[in-house]
Image: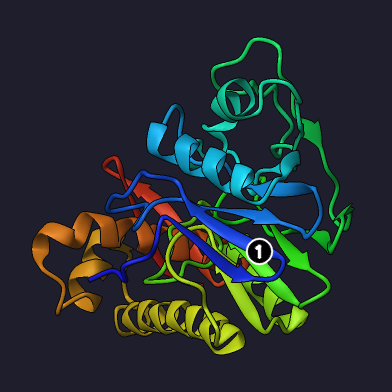
Amino acid sequence: MTAVLPKVEQLSPRVIRILGGNPGPYTLQGTNTYVVGTGKSRILIDTGEPDIEEYLNSLTTTLSDHSVQIEAILCTHWHHDHVGGIAGICNKVQPDFLPKISKLPRNPESKEDVIGSDTMKFNYLNDGDLIKTEGATLRVVYTPGHTDDHMVLLLEEDNFVFTGDCVLGEGTCVFEDLYTYMKSLQKIVDLNPSVLYPGHGPVVDNAVPKLKYYIDHRNMREKQIIDTLQKNQSGFMTAMELVKNIYTDTPEHLHIGARNNVNHHLSKLEKEERVEKREDEEETKWRLK
């Protein structure tokens, strides 16, 4: 069961969370978007999905109630539930003042269009950039793994981190590249944040223990894979064979998802030159080096 979150909540003197109105199995209660700052002009972190009227109404009401406007939009990564709401916000919530829209570039760089607009363009940030508004300074920290362009944002005044989809408020998250994702988790640990504001789910008050749990969980799976391969060193194993040996308490209909995770672990181990693979009858098989 996911926690029940209000549509709008003042989390601190500098931060208001507004739910994206798009709950689901992957978005949990919906995408968390955050209005940051204390002055008349503020920063919006992430924007939800395209044309969610509930979200646009909540954002409009929040800005009106606080007599503020959005001067900049920062998107933690390219997924549609984080960048999709940009055009709706600019056209319907704040049509008389276009905020600066920024994110990190894709890696490798490629052309990106703002969903729903032929004229709006992204401004591309760099790792370490500082974005300032009255009452808040946000530092860009490049954290690839969930996606190739993912960033988290350190709120320097409070040492809080907006984690995007690198860390969730509940459960664990998916990733494109485990090797870089693990390095990104450690990078956030090294910031020693006191609080995490995730892209989905409730605020995480026990920030470092949560990050270490993520790291420990992945390391536990990696150890299980290595131990299983070690027991079978005479031959190669497919990812699904590893799943059936490791995920013994997981219902079989979830094994395909588990296989994706195992494949990510195997790719990481290959980059570390700890396993080798061979293609066998259209199946990839693995063994320890």
Packing grade of label 1 (10 A; few <14, some 14-19, many >=20) is many
Camera sees residue 162: yes
Q: Secondary structure at mark 1?
A: strand
Residue shown at the point (41%, 80%) measured from the top left: 226
Residue 237, position as x, y percentages in the image: 29, 65
Camera sees residue 164: no
Residue shown at the point (55%, 89%) measured from the top left: 209
Along the line of sight, the residue nearer the viewer: 126 or 202? 202
Along the line of sight, the residue nearer the viewer: 89 or 64? 64
Say left or right for 37 vs 275: right
Residue 202, position as x, y percentages in the image: 45, 70
Question: Residue 141's image quarter?
Answer: bottom right
Q: Is residue 173 above or below residue 227?
A: above
Quadrant including the N terminus: bottom left
- Count numbered badges in the picture: 1
Residue shown at the point (10%, 68%) measured from the top left: 251
Say left or right for 255 vs 218: left
Say left or right for 11 vs 48: right
Residue 150, position as x, y percentages in the image: 65, 51
Looking at the rendered structure, the kind of residue marked 1 is Val
Q: Is residue 101 above or below residue 189?
A: above
Say left or right for 286 vs 216: left
Determine which residue is flagged by label 1: 15
Residue 111, position as x, y percentages in the image: 70, 22
